[in-house]
Image (cartoon, rainbow, N blue to C red):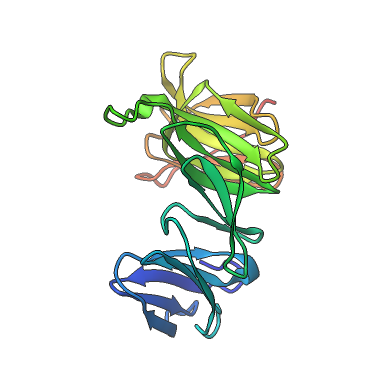
Amino acid sequence: MDWPSGEVFEAVGESILALRPDGRELWHKAIGAGSTVSLGPGRDLYVGNNGEVIRFDRETGVEICRAPVESVAGWIGTADGLFSVINGTLRQLSGSCASTALFTLGDATGYSLHAYNNGRIFGFEDRGSRTQPYDAMLDRLFGVSIDGRSGWRQDQILPAALPIRAIVNGVLYVLGLDRDDALKQKLFLISAVTGDVLDRIEVAGLCQSCGVAVSNAGTIYLNDLRSTTVFQIQPQY
């Protein structure tokens, strides 16, 4: 979704569908099955399909550019470009559809990018063996600046599904299990710059499938997605 306009973009079957906020069709394109959709520079739509990324004008659906890429999966869209990790290397796709290798993150088995904020990328690396089945216990949170000058890895957290729930005022709000406390489920507040844990909030008894929202002032609103009860929490850091 494009938040300023309320327009919605999604891959449906073999087409890309653009909808107005009231649900009426804005435009659609027949691209092919298995397309990926991201919003990127210019708030335009970047579609990955069949080894290419194509930029479409958000309002009209007119093609602006296209280029081959190593993979159409795993890109996250930001105003500063689309980012992905391919063979351990962080790559950036610009508004002109040019893909640039920025730097090597490391030699982990795999990387998944989850969020972007103020020139920093956040995600998880799989430290397991390439010859063994995937083990989520070996996932580790990392953050890195897109210029490669600073980065961190956080070993204390075993990430939950969709772990990074918010980024507000330089703080990541991450759901996961505490490796230092018998794998208890908690909401972790983590410095986006250093990776330090600023606070740990136990969510047992509050939520199992947790919904998280954070105000600009840092007030946390927590609920179980199966309940209408909302808890308000003031962090202690």
Residue depicted at x 37% and y 24%: 137
- Residue 118 place in picture, x, y as percent: 70, 48
Figure quadrant of residue 161: top left
Residue depicted at x 39% and y 75%: 16
Task: Using the image as rendered, state which of residue 11 and residue 232 is in the foreground.
Answer: 11
Figure quadrant of residue 207: top left
Whether residue 226 can be seen here = yes
Q: Is residue 173 left or right of residue 229?
A: right
Whether residue 230 can be seen here = no
Figure quadrant of residue 200: top right
- Residue 187 place in picture, x, y as percent: 52, 31
- Residue 7 place in picture, x, y as percent: 51, 74
- Residue 237 place in picture, x, y as percent: 70, 26
Q: Is residue 102 left or right of residue 114?
A: right
Task: Using the image as rendered, state which of residue 71 and residue 187 is in the foreground.
Answer: 71
Residue depicted at x 62% and y 68%: 95
Q: Can you say whether 3 is above or below 221 in the image?
A: below
Q: Can you say whether 236 is above or below 114 in the image?
A: above
Q: Is residue 122 left or right of residue 236?
A: left
